[in-house]
Image: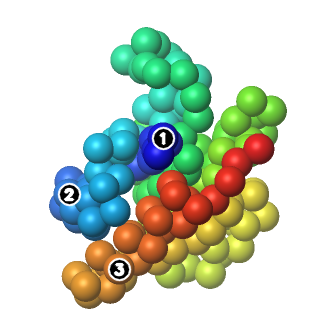
């Protein structure tokens, strides 16, 4: 099976570690690229900066934190969904924000899913496992 990359955009190291741990249950941890802010997301997707020589292809999904430095998740989502070369890439907001305005705005911009990070460890692990299994293993992209 040829697994596609999951692009994890997260600036909290603890959340990065937990996400990788959860995805490792499906043997997806070796296919995760981690970026720490929105600028790095766009550089990754556009093969720029330190990602200039990365392997070709789009990630299976972008797991995107809402609140990040330099360029937040909403700005990144706008750029992805307004770029004809990138708009097909599924984007899942993975955030601690329960603000309905954030939820509504991201769906208006074309987010594929909005997942609030559970505070409980087991719920967090289960949520990430299910996300990883669906987007990296089950979902078919054009």
**Image disc number at residue 17:** 2
Compared across the picture, whether 10 is left or right of 39 comes to left
- Name the residue: 51% across, 55% down: 136
* Residue 72 x, y percent position in the rendering: 50, 49
Residue placed most toward the observer, 41 or 30: 30
Compared across the picture, whether 106 is left or right of 29 comes to right
Judge depth for marks 1 and 3 and give the one in front. Answer: 1
Asked if the residue at tag 2 contacts the one at tag 1, i.e. Cβ–Cβ closer than 8 Å, the answer is no
Which secondary structure, mark 2?
Answer: helix
Q: Quadrant of residue 32?
A: top left
Which residue was labeled with disc 1?
2
- Crowding at label 2, few (<14), some or many (≥20) Cα neighbours within 10 Å? few
Asked if the residue at tag 3 contacts the one at tag 1, i.e. Cβ–Cβ closer than 8 Å, the answer is no
* Residue 57 x, y percent position in the rendering: 58, 28
**Image disc number at residue 128:** none
- Crowding at label 3, few (<14), some or many (≥20) Cα neighbours within 10 Å? some
Does 104 appear above or below 55?
below
Which secondary structure, mark 3?
Answer: helix
Q: In the rendered structure, which disc, 3 or 2, sits on the residue that comes first in sequence?
A: 2
- Name the residue: 45% across, 73% down: 130
Q: CA distance from mark 1 to mark 3?
A: 23 Å
| Whether residue 92 can be seen here | no
Q: In the rendered structure, which disc, 1 or 2, sits on the residue that comes first in sequence?
A: 1
Which secondary structure, mark 1?
Answer: loop
Compared across the picture, whether 65 is left or right of 42 comes to left
Which residue was labeled with disc 3?
126
Q: Point out the image quarter for the C terminus.
A: top right
* Residue 84 x, y percent position in the rendering: 80, 33
Compared across the picture, whether 61 is left or right of 19 comes to right
- Name the residue: 25% across, 85% down: 122
Q: In the rendered structure, which disc, 1 or 3, sits on the residue that comes first in sequence?
A: 1
């Amino acid at each position: 099976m040829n697994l596609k990359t999951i692009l994890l955009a997260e600036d909290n190291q603890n959340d990065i570690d937990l996400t990788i741990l959860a995805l490792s249950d499906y043997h997806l941890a070796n296919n995760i690229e981690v970026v720490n802010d929105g600028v790095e997301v766009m550089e990754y997707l556009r093969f720029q900066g330190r990602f200039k020589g990365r392997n070709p292809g789009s990630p299976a999904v972008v797991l995107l934190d809402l609140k990040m430095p330099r360029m937040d998740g909403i700005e990144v989502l706008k750029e992805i969904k307004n770029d004809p070369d990138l708009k097909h890439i599924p984007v899942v907001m993975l955030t601690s924000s329960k603000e309905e305005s954030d939820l509504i705005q991201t769906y208006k911009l074309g987010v594929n899913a909005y997942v609030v990070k559970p505070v409980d460890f087991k719920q967090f692990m289960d949520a990430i496992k299910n996300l990883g299994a669906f987007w990296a293993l089950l979902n078919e992209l054009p």
